């Protein structure tokens, strides 16, 4: 699922997600829980303000695309 992401850009572009949009709904990232690198992509496991966990994938070589890879509802 494609997602629109706004990032903090420090010394690197798109260093970490600050908020993301699924449709018209905005989710604020409260915490980046984990970050790892694939061959071409960067993955972020984040907790949003709704308390749920999301895995976002950033693909800079695919037109700077972001996608939602996984979702887990916290009880």
Image (tube, rainbow, N blue to C red):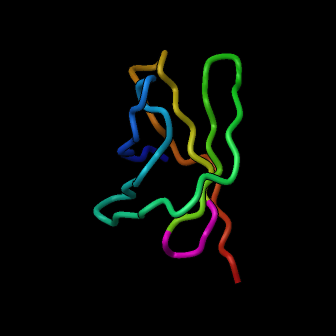
Question: Relative to 54, is 56 above or below?
Answer: above
**Residue at the outermost left position:** 24
Question: Relative to 50, is 21 above or below?
Answer: above
The image quadrant that residue 54 belongs to is bottom right
- Between residue 33 and residue 54, name the one nearer to us: 33
Q: Which residues are magenta?
A: 49-53
Question: Relative to 15, is 61 above or below?
Answer: above
Query: In the displayed structure, does residue 30 sit left or right of residue 33?
Result: left
- Between residue 59 and residue 44, name the one nearer to us: 44
> Which secondary structure class fits the magenta region best?
loop
Residue 35 location (% of width, % of height) = 67, 40
Query: In the displayed structure, does residue 35 sit left or right of residue 29?
Result: right
Residue at (59% x, 63% y) in the render: 47
**Residue at the outermost bottom position:** 75
In magenta segment, residue 21: no
Residue 12 location (% of width, % of height) = 45, 23
Residue at (70% x, 84% y) in the render: 75
**Residue at the outermost front position:** 11
Residue at (63% x, 37% y) in the render: 43
Residue 21 location (% of width, % of height) = 36, 56
């Amino acid at each position: 699922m494609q997602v629109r992401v706004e990032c903090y850009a420090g010394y690197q572009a798109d260093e970490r997600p600050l908020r993301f949009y699924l449709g018209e709904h905005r989710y604020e990232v409260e915490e980046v829980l984990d970050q790892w690198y694939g061959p071409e992509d960067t993955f972020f496991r984040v907790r949003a303000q709704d308390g749920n966990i999301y895995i976002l994938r950033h693909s800079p070589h695919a037109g700077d695309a972001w996608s939602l890879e996984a979702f887990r509802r916290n009880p």
